[in-house]
Image (spheres, grey):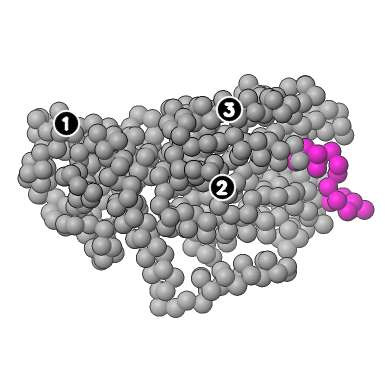
Amino acid sequence: MNLRFKTVVSLLLLCFGLNTFGQESMRRWRKMNQVRNDKFDLVLPEVMRENNIDMWIITNREGNFDPLYSDMGEGYVSSTGYYIFTDNGGDRIERAVLGIGGYLLEKSNAFDYFGSSAELLEFVQTRNPKSIGLNMSKNFGGADGLTHTAYIELVELLGPELKKRFVSAEKLVSDFRSRRVASEIAIYGEAGDLSYTIAERAFSNEIITPGITTLEDVAWWMKEQQFKYNLESSFGMPSVYITGPNGVEATSSDRIIQRGDLLMIDWGVGLMNMYTDMKRMAYVLKEHETRVPESIQNAFNKGVKVRTIIKNSIKSGVTAQEAETSIYEALTKAGFNKMKAFNASTDLDKTDVIIGCHSVGNWGHGIGPSIAFFNPIRLNYVLKPTNLISIELFAYTKIPEWDGKKLRVPLEDDAIITERGVEWLYPINPRILIIK
């Protein structure tokens, strides 16, 4: 066991193993409350005004909570309840809760008023907002928490005149979630440390014995670590897979890991409402081998060069689409080939590249600006300082031993956009891990 791993384990034991009488639960609750209060104070006023929304109503029903339920502080809903935010002018947004209660929510110090859901009409009429944002979205599930029947109920309660003021809060939700405060970033760094430590430990001889251990053995061990440290995930079963000349051979299955295999992990953990998304890569040495074959190492090095170009090309203040254009221009200038579609590699004697630098944060795939072909709407969003983003790429390089077929090298780690550009949130993947 190396020194770095001993240090990480010691910290984990301190945080998760030795605390008694709910100290770890309270620690996490206090940190999430800090995030909540900071975002209500610092982010909410600017995003409500940018989106021209005077009042934001988030509806929750017992057994069917809005995706922002954890962001708001949760609470007990007996039937239907509302978190309501009103811009009355000034520096502070009024925060009220109607029909939702409970110890943790009320002790959070995040809300100004707690009342009954029966007060909704009077509450809204008294404040007389010009626009009322509701979580309705045809593009993002995370901004589409208002159910059809809850919408009908709102119309019945508020009446036809107020109904005319209903607008989608889709962009507001994206902005509120994706603009980060320092307390959130601190949590994300902690989540990243846990995520990569577990992943790199999974790809070691502590867990893998060639010829015996299966892919699903590794995946279930990783799931057990999530259970042990009370971590969540956006992705279900960790993707532990083997790749070769014909692409992915098996994923989290009963396939036994053999010498000469090239292994990949794609996964992430959830900690205090913050979710990571990362990849790691390992090679299982053949008998008498002492290092990764030169051709595979070369392919990995090409991927690292692509990652550096991506990182250096992303700047704040431009749309994600503009950033994508700049990235591919820089990659082409450096001699790489832009692929037309995912897994559509060419016969060119160049490394083919496709990127998917998506938003991360409150899910493994977040809701903010996204430099990714699979998020076309959010390609039009402007990259802002504090946005969290996965620097994800797939680089395809020819392997002579594979008759010229290309190895897909997937690299992914999470970063933050700042005024200076892109900065990493934890130690990124520096190498192909070796299993002896």
Q: Is residue 9 placed above or below 237 in the rendered structure?
A: below
Callout 1: helix, strand or loop?
Answer: loop
Drawn side of residue 387 relative to residue 172, left or right: right
Q: Which residue is mark 2?
A: 423
Q: Are marks 1 and 3 in contact (CB under 8 Å)?
A: no
Which label is found at residue 326? Answer: 3
The residue that appears at 40% across and 52% down in the rendered structure is: 181
Badge 1 density bin: few <14, some 14–19, many ≥20, Cα 10 Å: some
Taking the magenta stretch, the answer to whether it contains residue 296 is: yes
Side of 185 where 260 appears, left or right: right
Q: Which residue is mark 1?
A: 165
**Percent x, y of residue 354:** 63, 29
Residue 332 drawn in magenta: no
- Estimate the x, y position of residue 378 in percent, counting from the top left: 44, 31
Total residue callouts: 3
275 lies above or below 295: below
Residues 31 and 103: in front is 31
